[in-house]
Structures are given as structure tokens and as C-alpha cells.
Image (tube, rainbow, N blue to C red):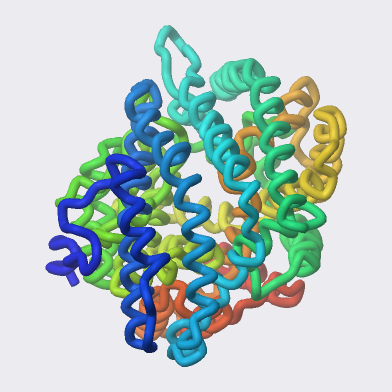
């Protein structure tokens, strides 16, 4: 595996030195695929593999352009290179993709392809055929161009505290300080800086909603939500299932979160729990920290992964050797963190904004889980089988967080700090559900009502937020910050409707952890077997392979929330 990943798979169709330097360079290979005669099942399979190779190369070149642009948003040439793929390549590839989809589905030999191997792939191709419209190509290009502006706006947001200019991520560390006046002061700085861009982000989001709605209407859908469900291939659950999940979260998780907030208020001895009191250690201790140094963070995560399964550590070692890590926060770097799969070379890229906080450790483990997933699915024959649905991708990352938890002494040698880290994380595990429910329900409203005004959007946000609120935090004097909290969520701007998956996968991760407590080796074996499937099988089957249920019913939410609460009590 290591040799194969480090020495890129030999190309079978494109020249080894081929690069997409222009549309004219790529077009002949797409014409070849479009016009090639296919006279047997074997020839059809070879055609699928050749097409997959072109997709892998295009995806990887675009990926590197995206990564480099995010690392330095101030470099116009890097942005220009990424926009070359968005404006010049992708719009011209799209009609070919549709023609190739038609060719595949129309082939008399498609019916003779191995169903077990190609079922999910063919199902996705047929759905893309159904929703493709030529008139959406320029709209998709415009959406891709506009949504990148969120990163550009966010990347230049800084605050100056005690004479030092710093990124928003770094400034947020002060919200963990035990001195309340420091937290309040920095919170005010962060809020004021974000308020400067409120109108700009509202305008950007309104434009994106308008463009996305038009794409849906062109494709014959009632709204963009329904279009996106088809585009994301949500075959395993419905819109109503999401609404039921929202209700389950409100009924089963929010009361537990209310207990946490009331305990926080009591332990901090506060008459009123304020927004700047939510990140500080509730027992009044100094914030947990890890090394802000990217190399040390990597090495400790490698050591951690070795304890769970040496293979996991080897994946990160390969990435480190290849330079596929950029972990530290710096001015001009876009916010956020991600693991970017690179389908041709197999070894992905981890990008994050480490500032030395405890959450940086969690992010690294999380993205490391995604990275392991990329390695385990690297040998699948078709690129689309490696393009993972989020319900599966996030199971890998969130699962890794919990599977490693009993070995966090690598980061926290002090026993008290280790206990604090575990408690803080388990509370966060439950805390994610109400926020995911809020963001997801908000998106449903936004796209069911695409012609809303900014004022109507603000009202809807407040109403939805109230459904998942514990009603313990006192927001008086900071109502404006609460009213625009959604603007911090990258997913709303860049990857619409990709968020409910976090809650679905978090349930799966808890179930994995529950199994791990009983049989660690078997659970890790099942976890690796599931991740090795990539997206070659339906989601439910992948979860079953992992030894868990694809389930987010009220009863299941209750059972797993109770398990986490019981584990918290043991720490």
C-alpha cells in the first residue's frame, strides 16, 4: 500500500506527463471517450476506467489549485489558477460528462456489468443524467465563482488585541481565559469585526440562493432543496426523515444541553450566563492547550494512531513525507479545516488552522480519520467510488475521534487534564446535534422560500434557533450577534445541504465507540472494512459493514445520547 501510494499509479490512457494547461489539451481525450466504439462488456469496462482516469487527473489538478489558493488568499495568481478550472475547464467538461453518461447508460453491455460492483456507480450516473441541463452550466460556473468569496471575506478578518493583530481563530482562544473581563472584551472585538461584513455576507448569500434556485427550476424541481437531494444522491433517507431527526434532537438532546448549561452557570458562580462564558473551562481552570507547532501536532497524532492500528499512523507518515499537510493558522489563510482527497496519487492533503487549542487536536484527529478513509479507498477502480457521501466520510472522521479517546494521554500527560479533555469532548459530541439541526432546518426554510427578504431570513433564523435553544444563555445587548450567527457557517455558502450528515455520522460514531468499548479489535476491523468500500455500496450496507445501524430515529437518538451521558458520569 505504501509503495503504491508513494509511486503514483501508472496511467493507462493519458500520457504520464499530461497536465491540463488548456482546454485544447484536454478536449481530444474527451472526444475519444465520446466517440469510441464499444463492442463488448470488456471494452465498456476499459472505457469506464479510462474515463475514471481523466476524472481523477482533473479532480486532482483542481484540488491542488483550491488548496494553494486557500493557503494564501492574498496571492492573485493562485486564485487565478483555481478560477481557470472553474471558468475555463469545468463548464466545457460538463456537456461532455452528460454525453458520456448517456453513452454509458445507452450501451447494450451496461446491463451485463457486475451489479455488485457497479450498482451505486450506475445509480449515480442515471441521477446526474436526469438533473443535467445545458442552461445550468453558466449558472454553476457563476455559483462556483461567487461562493469562493466567502473564504476571501473571512480570511482577511482580523482583530487587534493589546497591540497585536491576529486572526479570528487565534483571538477566539481568549474566550477560554479564566478572567471574565478578558473574554468579554475579546468577544466584543470579534463581534464588531464580524458585524462589518454582515451586509456583504447577506448580499452574497442572497445571490447564491437566487442562482441555486434558478438551477433547480431549470432542472424541473420545485426548489433547490429537492434538486440538491437528488444531486447528493440521498437515496437512503428523505426530507421528512430530516424533519423527524430535527424533532428528535430538540426532544432528546436539547434537554441534556440545558443541563450542561445550567451546570456551567452554577460552577462558574454566575448570575447570568453570557455568550463569552461558553468556551471557558466550567470549573474555572486554565484552557486546555496542545502544541501550536504543526510538526509536533503531526508527530503526536501519528503516535496516537499507532496505538489504535499501525496502518492509521503509516497513512499520516506518508502524508508528512510528501508534504501533504498545512496545519498552522496564519494571516491570509482561509479559515476552516479539511482533508482533500487526491484521487490519482491516493495520498490526500490535510489543511487546518492550528493555534494551539484543544480543538486543534480534535480537528487533526478528525481530518486524520478522513485521510485514513482516502487511503483505504484508494484502490477502488473507479474515481466516483472514491467520491464519498458525507454520511460515510464523516463516520470515518468522527469515529476516529472517539476510537482514539482513551489514548489521549499522548497529548495530556496530566491525569486531570486528560479527564477534562474527555469530558469536554463528549459534551461537544452531544453539543453538535442542536447546532446541526439549526443549520439544516434553516437551509430547508431558505430554499423552500427562495424569494425571501433579508429581514424575513433573519426572522426565520431566530425562530429556528429558538427551537434548539436551551434558554440559559443571556444574549441581552448582543442580539445582533445571535441574529447573524449563521454567517460563520462555511457550509451555507460553499457546500449547501452538506451538514445534516454530521449529526447522522455522529450517531454512527457513538455506536462505533459503544462497540469499541466491548470489543476493540473487532470494531477497528469492521471500521476499516467499511471505509475500504468507499462508495461502492449503498450507505446502509456500509454502516452494516461497520457493525452499526444507519438509523436516526427518536429511539436511537435517545439510546445513544443516554450512553454518552452515562460515560460522562464515569469520568
Q: Nearer the viewer, residue 222 or 109?
A: 109
At horizontal 63% and vertical 20% (from top left) the residue drawn is: 197
Work out whether 366 lies above or below 196. Answer: below
At horizontal 47% and vertical 66% (from top left) the residue drawn is: 100
Work out whether 103 lies above or below 159. Answer: below
Q: Is residue 65 left or right of residue 548?
A: left
Q: Is residue 156 left or right of residue 345?
A: right
Q: Nearer the viewer, residue 105 or 530?
A: 105
Work out whether 5 lies above or below 27. Answer: below
At horizontal 35% and vertical 28% (from top left) the residue drawn is: 72
Looking at the image, how many numbered discs can be counted on the residues?
A: 0
Residue 407 at least partly seen: no
The percent position of residue 284, horizontal first and vertical second, equals 54, 36
At horizontal 77% and vertical 51% (from top left) the residue drawn is: 217
Residue 190 at least partly seen: yes
The percent position of residue 420, horizontal first and vertical second, equals 47, 51
The percent position of residue 175, horizontal first and vertical second, equals 54, 29
Q: Is residue 424 left or right of residue 351?
A: right
Q: Quadrant of the N terminus?
A: bottom left
Q: Nearer the viewer, residue 223 or 73?
A: 223
The percent position of residue 141, horizontal first and vertical second, equals 55, 40
Q: For residue 302, what is the image quadrant?
A: bottom left
Amino acid at each position: 500500500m505504501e509503495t503504491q501510494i508513494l509511486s503514483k499509479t501508472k496511467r493507462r490512457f493519458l500520457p504520464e506527463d499530461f497536465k491540463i494547461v488548456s482546454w485544447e489539451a484536454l478536449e481530444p481525450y474527451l472526444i475519444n471517450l465520446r466517440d469510441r466504439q464499444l463492442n463488448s462488456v470488456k471494452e465498456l469496462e476499459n472505457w469506464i476506467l479510462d474515463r475514471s482516469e481523466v476524472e481523477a487527473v482533473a479532480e486532482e489538478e483542481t484540488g491542488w489549485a483550491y488548496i494553494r489558493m486557500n493557503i494564501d488568499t492574498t496571492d492573485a495568481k493562485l486564485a487565478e489558477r483555481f478560477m481557470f478550472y472553474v471558468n475555463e475547464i469545468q463548464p466545457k467538461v460538463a456537456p461532455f460528462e452528460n454525453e458520456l453518461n448517456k453513452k454509458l447508460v445507452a450501451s447494450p453491455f451496461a446491463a451485463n456489468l457486475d451489479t455488485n460492483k457497479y450498482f451505486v456507480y450506475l445509480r449515480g450516473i442515471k441521477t446526474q443524467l436526469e438533473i443535467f441541463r445545458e442552461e445550468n452550466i453558466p449558472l454553476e460556473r457563476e455559483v462556483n465563482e461567487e461562493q469562493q468569496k466567502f473564504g476571501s471575506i473571512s480570511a482577511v478578518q482580523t482583530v487587534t488585541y493589546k497591540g497585536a493583530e491576529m486572526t479570528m481563530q487565534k483571538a477566539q482562544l481568549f474566550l477560554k481565559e479564566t478572567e471574565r473581563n478578558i473574554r468579554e472584551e475579546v468577544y466584543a472585538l470579534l463581534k464588531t469585526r464580524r458585524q462589518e461584513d454582515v451586509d456583504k455576507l447577506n448580499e452574497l448569500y442572497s445571490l447564491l440562493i437566487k442562482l441555486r434556485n434558478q438551477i433547480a427550476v431549470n432542472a424541473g424541481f420545485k426548489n433547490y432543496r429537492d434538486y440538491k437531494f437528488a444531486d447528493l444522491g440521498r437515496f437512503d433517507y428523505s426530507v421528512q426523515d430530516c424533519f423527524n431527526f430535527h424533532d428528535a434532537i430538540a426532544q432528546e438532546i436539547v434537554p441534556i444541553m440545558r443541563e450542561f448549561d445550567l451546570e456551567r452557570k452554577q460552577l462558574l458562580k454566575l448570575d447570568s450566563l453570557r455568550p463569552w462564558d461558553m468556551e471557558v473551562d466550567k470549573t474555572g481552570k486554565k484552557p486546555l492547550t496542545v502544541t501550536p507547532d504543526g510538526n509536533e501536532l503531526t508527530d503526536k497524532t501519528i503516535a496516537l494512531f499507532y496505538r489504535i492500528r499501525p496502518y492509521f499512523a503509516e497513512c499520516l507518515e506518508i502524508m508528512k513525507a510528501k508534504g501533504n499537510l498545512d496545519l498552522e493558522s496564519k494571516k491570509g489563510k482561509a479559515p476552516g479545516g479539511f482533508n482533500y482527497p487526491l484521487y490519482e496519487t491516493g495520498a490526500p492533503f490535510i489543511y487546518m488552522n492550528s493555534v494551539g487549542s484543544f480543538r486543534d487536536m480534535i480537528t487533526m484527529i478528525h481530518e486524520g480519520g478522513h485521510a485514513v478513509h482516502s487511503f483505504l479507498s484508494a484502490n477502488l477502480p473507479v474515481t466516483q467510488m472514491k467520491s464519498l457521501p458525507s454520511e460515510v466520510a464523516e463516520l470515518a472522521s468522527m469515529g476516529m475521534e472517539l476510537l482514539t479517546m482513551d489514548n489521549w494521554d499522548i497529548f495530556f500527560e496530566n491525569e486531570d487534564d486528560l479527564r477534562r479533555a474527555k469530558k469536554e469532548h463528549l459534551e461537544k459530541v452531544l453539543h453538535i446535534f442542536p447546532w446541526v439541526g439549526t443549520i439544516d432546518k434553516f437551509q430547508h426554510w431558505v430554499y423552500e422560500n427562495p424569494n425571501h427578504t433579508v429581514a424575513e431570513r433573519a426572522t426565520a433564523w431566530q425562530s429556528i434557533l429558538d427551537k434548539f435553544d436551551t434558554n440559559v444563555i443571556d444574549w441581552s445587548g448582543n442580539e445582533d450577534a445571535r441574529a447573524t450567527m449563521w454567517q460563520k457557517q462555511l457550509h451555507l455558502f460553499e457546500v449547501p445541504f452538506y451538514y445534516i450528515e454530521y449529526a447522522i455520522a455522529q450517531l454512527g460514531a457513538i455506536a462505533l465507540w459503544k462497540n469499541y468499548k466491548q470489543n476493540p479489535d473487532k470494531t477497528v476491523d469492521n471500521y476499516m472494512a467499511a471505509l475500504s468500500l468507499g462508495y461502492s455500496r449503498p450507505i446502509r450496507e456500509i454502516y452494516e459493514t461497520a457493525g452499526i445501524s444507519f438509523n436516526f430515529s427518536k429511539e436511537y437518538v435517545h439510546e445513544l445520547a443516554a450512553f454518552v451521558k452515562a460515560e460522562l458520569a464515569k469520568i
